[in-house]
C-alpha cells in the first residue's frame, strides 16, 4: 500500500445503527477514493491480533468484546495526505472532544463505541490494510 493510502473500519456501533452509508458518503465527499472494502465480523483471535499494540491497557478486553460484537466495514482509502487528512475527518478518539462536523462527533456516542477507526501512521496504514486485504482485493 502506498503512502497516499489509509485504512479504516466502520465499527460495530455505527454499522448496527445504520450509519454505514452516511459515513461512506461523508468520506467520499471529503475526497477519499475507496480502493478496497468489505463487510466482515472479526473473530476474537483476529481482533486481539489487530489491536495487540493495546494489549495490557485497561480497556483492552472491552475493546475486543466490542469489536467482535457485530460486523464492521473495513476499507482502504486513497487521497493525498490520506493518514493525516482522514484523522482530521474522523476527529478525536473521544467523540465528546471531537470537533463539530467530524465523523465521530456526528455518529459516535462514547470513547469505546467511537464509530470509526483511522490508521495513525503510514506504516500502520500498510500493516492494517494488509491485515484485512489480499493484493487481489485492493484496486
Ligand atoms: P481506536 O483508536 O480506533 O482503536 C483503539 C480503541 O480503543 C480506540 O479507538 C477507542 O475506541 C478505545 N479506547 C477506549 N479507551 C481508550 C483510551 N483511554 N485511550 C485510547 N483508546 C481507548
Image: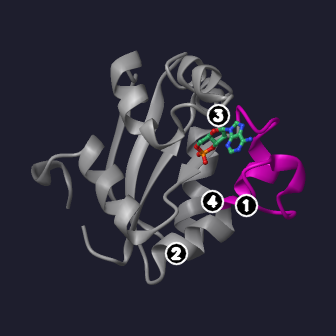
Q: Is residue 25 left or right of residue 80?
A: right
Mark in the foreground, 3 or 4: 3
Of mark 4 and mark 1, the one earlier in the sequence is 4
Q: How many marks?
A: 4
Give the CA separation, mark 4 to mark 1.
13 Å
Residue annotated with mark 3? 14
Q: Is residue 21 left or right of residue 45?
A: right
> What segment carries the magenta color?
90-113
CB at disc 3 and ligand 1 closer than 8 Å: no
Mark 4 = which residue? 26
Is residue 34 shown to the viewer in this render?
no
Who's the residue at 76% across and 40% down the image? 108
Question: Within the displayed image, which quadrant is ligand 1 positioned in?
Answer: top right
Label 2's element? loop
Q: CA distance from mark 2 to mark 3?
A: 21 Å
**Residue 58's x, y, as percent?**
68, 28
Q: Please provide percent x and percent y for residue 23.
A: 61, 49
Amino acid at each position: 500500500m502506498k503512502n497516499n493510502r489509509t485504512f479504516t473500519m466502520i465499527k460495530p456501533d455505527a454499522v448496527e445503527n445504520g450509519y454505514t452509508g452516511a459515513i461512506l458518503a461523508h468520506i467520499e465527499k471529503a475526497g477519499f477514493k475507496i480502493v478496497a472494502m468489505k463487510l466482515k465480523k472479526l473473530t476474537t483471535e483476529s481482533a486481539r491480533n489487530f489491536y495487540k499494540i493495546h494489549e495490557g491497557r485497561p480497556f483492552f478486553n472491552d475493546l475486543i468484546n466490542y469489536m467482535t460484537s457485530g460486523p464492521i466495514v473495513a476499507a482502504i482509502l486513497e487521497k493525498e495526505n490520506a493518514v493525516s487528512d482522514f484523522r482530521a475527518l474522523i476527529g478525536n478518539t473521544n467523540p465528546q472532544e471531537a470537533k463539530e462536523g467530524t465523523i465521530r462527533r456526528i455518529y459516535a456516542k462514547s470513547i469505546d463505541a467511537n464509530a470509526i477507526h483511522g490508521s495513525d501512521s503510514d506504516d500502520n496504514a500498510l500493516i492494517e490494510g494488509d491485515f484485512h486485504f489480499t493484493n487481489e482485493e485492493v484496486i
